[in-house]
Image (cartoon, rainbow, N blue to C red):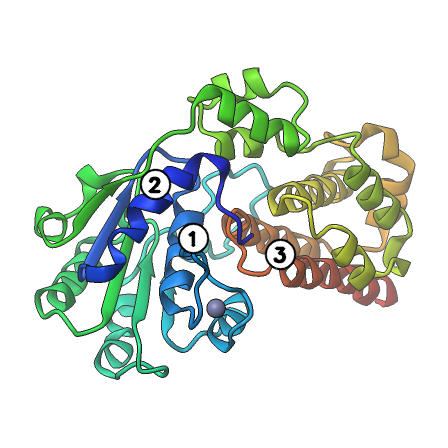
Amino acid sequence: MNELYPWQNEVWQRLQGLRARLPNALLLKGAEGIGKLDLALNFAQSILCETPQASGMACQSCPSCHWFTQESNPDFRLIQPDALSAADDTPEKEGSKKASREISVDQIRALSSFVNLSAHSGGYRVVLVHPAEAMNSNSANALLKTLEEPTDKLLFILVTHKPQQLLPTILSRSLSFAVPMPTRTEGASWLKQQGVADPESALAQTGFAPLSALLSAGEGAGTEEHKLMLAAVKQSAKFDALALAEQLQKVAPVQVIQFLQQWCYDLASYKMAGAIRYNPEQTDLIGNLSKNLSQQSLLRFIKELQVAKGVAFHPLNPKLLFESILLAYQQLLLTTSKA
Ligand SMILES: [Zn+2]
């Protein structure tokens, strides 16, 4: 996921204009579902890159870029709530703990050693806070303290679609940068490339935000990738998770996770209530698979998918994400069928 969305070229140029004199804090604001976080990640990676391209995009091959895509760049921190997705269509188990939707004060305090150390590379360090409005008043005040004592070569990037919910004192200490909406044509043609059957109406239903439209269009049913995933789940635990992750690399991660969510929702729903919602044509198979599954493990896996969906728009490495969720799904089938 290292390409800019087609509607972000112009805003990318403007961001590059800041490189010569970066502010302490940059506030990227704009509508929800237009790719602000991907833009912010691209910018963060490009700031840390040792040999950026002429366009300013990260080279993808220097050590810093390598670490960045492995989610282990020592000069980068991504601060976000444990759970990002508001879509909650999965069965909830009573008494189970929900992943937090807030950025806690502990998460901000944990930055202090990072803020006070100098960069591993001797260059910049970047902290990305997303979404900034998820900070509660304690965490916002803790961040404010850090912003009040600017550190050399430390850039905060705050991403928000609700700037009015941020502390005015944080706003006044940040350089505000508006991320534009794509035009309807840009949004629709991108959605079409993602396999959405009726991009115009998907866009219209989501206030013309393409990433939200993709999420709500969701499935891409009937596409090659959908067939691949269906063929894999039909093999029970015998499918090759690593090979499948490789084959799915080009697919939008949201689609893969949504497919698995719907599949597991059906497994759980059949097991508990004998009902199937998303894959009625697979009733026999779902009935057979769900028989041997432990309800608890299944619900736990559904929760993991929910969390994964929160980061699915901006996985630093989609293949790793696919590998880990597919292996976890396989494990779910293997361990419980022995029991
Ligand atoms: Zn690089």
Mark-to-mark CA distance, 1 and 2: 12 Å
In this view, 270 is above or below 20? above
Residue 322 in the image, given as x and y percentages of width and height: 68, 57
Give whichever of discs 1 and 3 has the lower sequence position: 1
Amino acid carrying label 2: it is: Val
Q: At which x and y percent is residue 269?
A: 72, 39
Instruction: Judge whether residue 39 can be spotted in this image.
Output: yes
Q: Amino acid at mark 1?
A: Ser
**Which residue does the image show at 44% across and 69% down from the upper left?**
51
Q: Is residue 225 left or right of residue 15?
A: right
For label 3, the SS is helix
| Quarter occupied by the C terminus | bottom right
Residue assigned mark 3: 318
Residue 150 placement, left or right of 100 = left
At x 50%, y 49%, the residue is 310
> Pointer 1: what residue?
55
Circle 1 or circle 2, nearest the eye: 1
Q: Which residue is mark 2?
A: 11
Q: Which sits in the foreground, 238 or 20? A: 20
From the image, state whether disc 1 or disc 3 is nearer to you. Answer: 1
Q: Residues within 10 Å of mark 3 (few under 14, many from 20)?
A: many
